[in-house]
């Protein structure tokens, strides 16, 4: 058995290495450079390793393979991975959520979820309530921020329900968290940059703004329907054992719930302060268009998403209760940070940057290859193809690049066409650019969920792509017709 397992490992390794280091030498499709082939091969090879071998050391191997691409320098690869703002954001947020996880508040919130009147109606009622809370908050909060708000709460729910890694119910809740974060971020342009990129490109070309209301009229129904169908898919195909929710002893857990201490209260206030620093700039700038208040929040927003958890982290280290800091950084770094997940995230950031590098030209080749085929099609078929293109690309590379590239291609191809609603098409592309929940390069939360042990990369891909197909179909049949009526 061990020999067979070892043989399987080496076969997978050889196949992966062949893709990573040999794909460059294969004949490239017309218009694609050898470096474009090389980057595509590296992505396929590392994806195989992520799926069937491990997530940590293949992510480091990935950086070494990218260093062999002529257009990329090793320093730029490190800058796009470990030096990326997203990596720092994740590191600081892991530490902040570790501090919150040591308090009793998460247990109280988790108990409130599990013991609510809706949850008592049945296990699937609880799952629906949990997903609905993510959908609601996600319409106004960045998906990565939202995931990290829910992650410690989810871990507490697992502990209360005595779930183990490998349990299907745990996998359902973890995958639902990631997928609902993605769906909700496409439902409104509030605090979500991907739809705004698409809407901005349309405004630049036509001088007409797509207002938030019309966008949401088309996007919210698709988001809600997608969420419902995703839960049906989980129920029919995943078939989790829901007995943990049925057998949950509420009385015992209520008895063991201790009163919050001063230390815990300060940690909670600090965490809420961090969330407000993430949310307030976008909301304030939406309401206030000029003046010192606008200037202050615009400046603070320009510091990036890593600044709020940095401030929160420093506050916890500075404040002492009973001559001890609220947070010991060395402890948080060793116990609170999921290093395999961070290493994988660094790798996904690097490969995403390489795939969208203009000198390598992979995305340009993709756009040029698809344009001639799309321009002569029936309008609804054209919408379906653009929707599928946006959904696939956002699940394989950068959301921002997807929104920019696919929207630009859509505007170029449909320019002058009268049989298609161009603003409706732009809304569909912008919305689906946010639906990133299938592969590790799609979003950091996908990589973290896949490496958490509660689910895995292969399972995340299977159900993530199922959710993507559902979203593409609903976008074509619901979002586009709805948006077309508004323009």
Image (cartoon, helix red, strand yellow):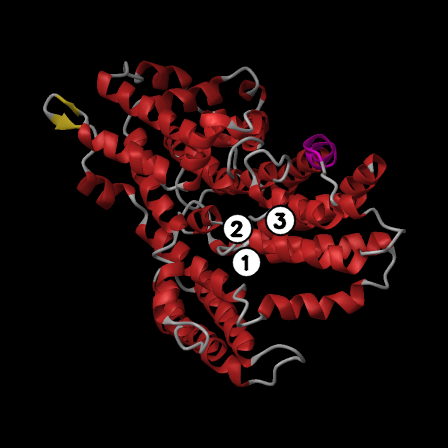
List the single residue furthest toward the left: 323
The magenta stretch spans residue 419: no
Residue 38 seen in this snapshot: yes
| Pointer 2 or 1: first along the chain | 1
Q: Kindly check if marks 3 and 2 are in contact, taking CB atoms under 8 A apart as contact.
A: no
Q: Residue at x 55, y 74 (%)?
A: 36
Q: Kindly check if marks 2 and 1 are in contact, taking CB atoms under 8 A apart as contact.
A: no
Q: Which residues are magenta?
A: 211-220
Question: What residue sits right under mark 3 in the picture?
Answer: 433
Using the numbered discs, state the Cα–Cα distance from disc 3 to disc 2 in whole angstroms.
Answer: 18 Å
Vertical comparison of 80 with 245: above or below: below
Residue situated in front as seen by the camera: 389 or 14: 389
Residue 58 seen in this snapshot: no
Q: Residue at x 54, y 21 (%)?
A: 119
Quadrant the N terminus occupies? bottom left
Quadrant the C terminus occupies? top right
Q: Nearer the viewer, mark 3 or mark 2?
A: 3
Q: x, y (%) of residue 118?
A: 57, 18
Q: Residue at x 59, y 29 (%)?
A: 128
What kind of element bears circle 3?
loop
Using the numbered discs, state the Cα–Cα distance from disc 2 to disc 1 in whole angstroms.
Answer: 16 Å
Disc 2 crowd, CA 10 A, few/some/many (<14, 14-19, 20+): many
What kind of element bears circle 1?
loop
| Pointer 3 or 2: first along the chain | 3
Vertical comparison of 280 with 240: above or below: above
Q: x, y (%) of residue 202?
A: 71, 47
What kind of element bears circle 2?
helix
On residue 460, the disc is: 2
Question: What residue sits right under mark 1 in the picture?
Answer: 397
């Amino acid at each position: 058995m061990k020999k067979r397992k070892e043989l399987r490992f080496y076969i997978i390794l050889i196949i992966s290495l062949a893709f990573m280091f040999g794909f460059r030498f294969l004949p490239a499709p017309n218009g694609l450079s050898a470096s474009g082939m090389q980057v595509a091969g590296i992505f396929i090879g590392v994806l195989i390793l992520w799926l069937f071998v491990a997530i940590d050391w293949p992510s480091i191997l990935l950086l070494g393979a990218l260093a062999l691409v002529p257009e990329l320098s090793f320093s730029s690869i490190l800058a796009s991975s470990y030096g990326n703002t997203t990596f720092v954001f994740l590191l600081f947020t892991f530490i902040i959520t570790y501090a919150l996880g040591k308090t009793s508040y998460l247990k109280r919130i988790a108990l409130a979820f599990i013991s609510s009147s809706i949850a008592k109606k049945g296990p699937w009622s609880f799952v629906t309530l949990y997903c609905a809370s993510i959908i609601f908050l996600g319409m106004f909060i960045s998906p990565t921020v939202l995931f990290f708000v829910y992650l410690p709460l989810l871990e507490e729910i697992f502990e209360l329900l005595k779930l183990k890694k490998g349990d299907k119910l745990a996998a359902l809740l973890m995958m639902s968290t990631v997928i609902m974060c993605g769906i909700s971020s496409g439902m409104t342009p509030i605090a979500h940059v991907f739809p705004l990129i698409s809407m901005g490109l349309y405004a630049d070309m036509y001088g007409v703004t797509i207002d938030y209301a019309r966008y949401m009229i088309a996007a919210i129904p698709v988001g809600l329907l997608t969420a419902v169908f995703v839960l049906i898919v989980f129920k029919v195909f995943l078939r989790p054992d829901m007995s943990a929710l049925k057998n949950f002893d509420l009385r015992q857990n209520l008895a063991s719930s201790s009163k919050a201490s001063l230390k815990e209260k300060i940690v909670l206030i600090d965490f809420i302060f961090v969330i407000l620093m993430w949310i307030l700039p976008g909301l304030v700038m939406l309401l206030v268009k000029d003046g010192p208040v606008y200037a202050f929040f615009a400046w603070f927003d320009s510091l990036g998403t890593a600044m709020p958890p940095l401030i929160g982290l420093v506050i916890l280290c500075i404040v002492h209760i009973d001559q001890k800091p609220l947070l010991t950084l060395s402890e948080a770094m060793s116990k609170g940070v999921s290093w395999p997940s961070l290493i994988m995230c660094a790798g996904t950031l690097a490969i995403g940057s390489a795939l969208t590098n203009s000198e390598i030209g992979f995305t340009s080749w993709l756009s040029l290859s698809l344009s001639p085929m799309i321009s002569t099609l029936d309008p609804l078929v054209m919408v379906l193809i653009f929707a599928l293109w946006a959904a696939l690309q956002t699940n394989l590379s950068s959301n921002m690049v997807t929104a920019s590239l696919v929207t630009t291609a859509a505007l170029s191809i449909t320019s002058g066409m009268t049989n298609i609603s161009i603003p409706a098409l732009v809304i569909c592309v912008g919305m689906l650019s946010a639906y990133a929940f299938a592969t590790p390069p799609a979003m950091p939360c996908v990589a973290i969920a896949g490496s958490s042990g509660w689910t895995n990369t292969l399972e995340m891909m299977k159900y993530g792509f199922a959710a993507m197909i559902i979203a593409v179909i609903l976008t074509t049949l619901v979002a586009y017709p709805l948006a077309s009526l508004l323009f």
